[in-house]
């Protein structure tokens, strides 16, 4: 008999597919980034120093964009997995063990995933003096 699929499992599958797409897109972008970095390195060694600044800025911007995309994908996966494990009845501490984070972080992830209000502010907003979620 096949295991029962819960809505949390369906959400997790969707996010995993999104992460796979982000990884594939990232691999293509990283190939382009590698070529751009090598071109900038060649310019650095050569006599084309005036264009160096623009080339290095483009490489830096591309690296930062890749990091942002993967950070967003990781956050989405972490929140969705935490919610799926909670829907299966796991405690915050059990979920923390699975995710490799503290139980307090799990509470923050679940609050953000569910859209609940925390500290008197809407989900995603940063309370004054707080660290956000």
Image (cartoon, grey):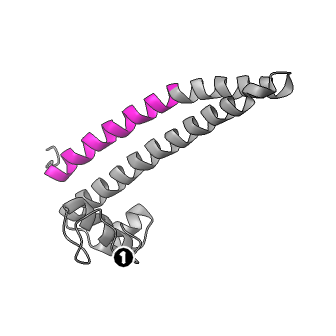
**Residue 40: percent from the left, percent from the top?**
73, 27
Magenta region, main secondary structure: helix
The answer to whether residue 106 is left or right of residue 62 is left
In this view, which residue lies farthest toward the front?
50
**Quarter holding residue 41:** top right
Q: Residue visible at 45% across and 65% down?
A: 100
Q: Is residue 32 magenta?
A: no
Local SS, label 1: loop
Position of residue 59 measured from the top left corner of the image (x, y, whole percent): 63, 33
**Left or right of 105, for residue 52:** right
Residue 24 forms part of the magenta stretch: yes
Give the number of callouts.
1
Position of the C terminus by quadrant: bottom left
Residue 96 image-quadrant placement: bottom left
Q: Position of residue 4 (x, y in %)?
A: 13, 49
Highlighted range, magenta: 6-28
In this rendering, the answer to whether 38 lies above or below 88 is above
Q: Which residue is mark 1?
A: 128
Q: Please tell me which residue lies in front, 31 or 131.
A: 131
Q: Position of residue 121 (x, y in %)?
A: 24, 71
| Residue at 17% from the left image edge and 48% from the top image edge | 3
Q: Residue at x 26, y 47 (%)?
A: 12
109 with respect to 48 (left or right) = left
């Amino acid at each position: 008999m096949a295991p029962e699929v819960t809505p949390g499992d369906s959400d997790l599958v969707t996010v995993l597919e999104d992460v796979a797409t982000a990884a594939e897109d990232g691999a293509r972008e990283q190939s382009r980034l590698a070529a751009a970095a090598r071109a900038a390195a060649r310019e650095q060694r050569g006599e084309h120093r005036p264009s160096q600044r623009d080339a290095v800025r483009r490489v830096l911007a591309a690296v930062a964009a890749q990091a942002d995309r993967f950070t967003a994908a990781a956050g989405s996966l972490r929140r969705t997995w935490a919610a799926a494990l909670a829907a299966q009845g796991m405690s915050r501490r059990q979920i923390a063990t699975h995710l490799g984070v503290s139980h307090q972080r799990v509470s923050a992830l679940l609050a953000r995933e569910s859209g609940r209000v925390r500290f008197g502010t809407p989900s995603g907003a940063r309370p004054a003096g707080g660290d956000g979620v």
